[in-house]
Image (tube, rainbow, N blue to C red):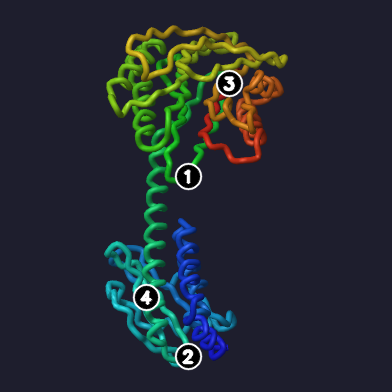
């Protein structure tokens, strides 16, 4: 098997097909942003065209020891035996950036350092039963450079995605309180790439001895700038609530705070309300600042809008907000969503065209708050075949 593989290496390392092979290799390496997949792709590229087998070593940190993360042989039956042989191979010099020749009992080994942006990432070891021609060594060096760059790009992408997931979690409520007489359900689903922070958010928190507040909002855009406005909004709502400001006054002050951000400011739609348990259910006061209309569902299936549209935040300096008062009898449901729900698109149609969201909510009579939220989420997903391009947030409040 080794001799056949070696002959294929000799045949494939000459002629006009080689440039095409390099181009294909570059496309394969550039096509993944999963750090765990890159070593496997490296091995599949070079075996059997450059070598009979390939072992890829990486380190967990710049100064950490190298460890074998992927091994491939043209004869799969020999992988386990090769792994035992490699245990005795000295690959303890991760900072050596010079391609070198090593030896195993039945193989010559070409050790190609994987270096990108001046940093050693690991080692690619190629093995074959006979000597490596000079041109194959040159090709291996070329593949090694491309592979290292792909590996570094994938690592950077994964680190950025992890950082943004942590940032996204920090913008959501740290806990969800128990509210007397309230059954609630919330769903939040960011859209887009893993390295984007979504602009939608929600909150539910205790504001006083006998009152609680909730919010659901949508910041224009995504990324760090949107996250900054999201953080400003959530912390402002909580801080002013603790200082005793009513919900209308809170939105007025938040509007000013956003405008004071200057060029960093982003438009924000927000539905903010307070909840007070009463003997007959829940007393809810609401302010809708440019946000999709909140809907109330009665136990008999009747649905009606309950908020008055007012100016969105971060646009006008002189804005006065007024609160709507809504009573939720036992069994009534209040639904608040972001435009990732109402503007879910299927061709030329939007989900909320001709009251589509109200009809969907009307089918949820008798369900728990969590079940209502899940039913709306499923309806959004099923409305179109393609994945949603917008963030989605759903808050359901139900008087027990």
Q: CA distance from mark 1 to mark 2?
A: 45 Å
| Badge 1 or badge 4: first in the primary sequence | 4
Residue at the spot of label 1: 193
> Which numbered tag is attached to residue 335?
3
Q: Residue 275: horizontal and vertical position, in percent?
A: 49, 15
* Element at label 3: strand
Q: CA distance from mark 3 to mark 1?
A: 28 Å
| Badge 2 or badge 3: first in the primary sequence | 2
Q: CA distance from mark 2 to mark 4?
A: 19 Å
Residue at the spot of label 2: 129
Between disc 1 and disc 4, the foreground one is: 4
Name which residue lies at 36% across and 30% down: 231
* Element at label 2: loop
Tag 3 and tag 1, C-beta contact below 8 Å:
no
Between disc 2 and disc 4, the foreground one is: 4
Between disc 3 and disc 1, the foreground one is: 1
Label 4: how many residues lie within 10 Å, few (<14), some (14-19) or many (20+)? many
Residue at the spot of label 4: 141
Q: Residue 218: horizontal and vertical position, in percent?
A: 46, 26
Q: Residue 280: horizontal and vertical position, in percent?
A: 60, 9
98 sits to left or right of 284: left
Q: Residue 321: horizontal and vertical position, in percent?
A: 41, 9
| Badge 3 or badge 1: first in the primary sequence | 1
Between disc 2 and disc 3, the foreground one is: 2
* Element at label 1: loop
Between disc 3 and disc 4, the foreground one is: 4
Label 2: how many residues lie within 10 Å, few (<14), some (14-19) or many (20+)? some
Q: Is residue 37 visible?
A: no
Tag 1 and tag 2, C-beta contact below 8 Å:
no
Name which residue lies at 29% across and 78% down: 98
Q: CA distance from mark 2 to mark 3?
A: 69 Å
Q: Is residue 330 above or below residue 189?
A: above
């Amino acid at each position: 098997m080794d001799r056949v593989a070696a002959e294929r290496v000799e045949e494939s390392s000459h002629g006009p097909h080689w440039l095409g092979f390099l181009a294909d290799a570059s496309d394969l390496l550039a096509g993944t942003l999963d750090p765990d997949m890159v070593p496997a792709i490296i091995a599949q590229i070079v075996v059997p065209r450059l070598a009979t087998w390939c072992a890829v070593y990486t380190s967990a940190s710049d100064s950490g020891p190298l460890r074998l993360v992927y091994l491939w042989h043209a004869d799969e039956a020999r992988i386990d035996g090769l792994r035992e042989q490699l245990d005795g191979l000295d690959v303890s010099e991760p900072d050596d950036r010079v391609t070198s020749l090593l030896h195993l009992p039945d193989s010559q080994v070409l050790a190609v350092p994987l270096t990108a942006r001046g940093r050693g990432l690991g080692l690619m070891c190629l093995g074959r039963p006979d000597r490596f021609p000079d041109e194959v060594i040159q090709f291996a060096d070329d593949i090694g450079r491309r592979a290292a760059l792909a590996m570094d790009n994938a690592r950077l992408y994964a680190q950025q995605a992890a950082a943004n997931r942590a940032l996204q979690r920090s913008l959501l409520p740290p806990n969800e309180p128990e509210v007397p007489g309230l059954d609630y359900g919330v769903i939040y689903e960011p859209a887009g790439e893993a390295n984007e922070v979504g602009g939608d958010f929600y909150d539910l928190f205790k504001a006083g001895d006998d009152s609680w507040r909730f919010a659901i909002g949508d910041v224009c855009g995504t990324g760090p700038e949107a996250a900054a406005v999201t953080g400003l909004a959530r912390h402002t709502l909580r801080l002013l609530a603790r200082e005793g400001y009513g919900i209308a006054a809170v939105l007025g002050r938040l509007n000013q705070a956003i405008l004071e951000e200057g060029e960093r400011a982003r438009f924000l739609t927000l539905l903010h309300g307070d909840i007070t348990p009463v003997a007959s259910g829940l007393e809810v006061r609401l302010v809708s600042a440019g946000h999709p209309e909140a809907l109330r569902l009665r136990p008999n299936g009747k649905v009606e809008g309950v908020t008055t549209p007012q100016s969105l935040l971060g646009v006008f300096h002189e804005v006065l907000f007024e609160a709507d008062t809504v009573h939720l009898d036992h069994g009534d449901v209040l639904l608040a969503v972001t435009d990732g729900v109402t503007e879910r698109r299927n061709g030329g149609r939007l989900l909320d065209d001709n009251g589509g969201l109200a009809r969907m909510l009307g089918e949820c009579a008798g369900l728990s708050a969590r079940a209502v939220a899940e039913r709306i989420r499923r309806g959004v997903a099923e409305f179109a075949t393609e994945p949603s391009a917008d963030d989605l947030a759903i808050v359901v409040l139900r008087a027990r």
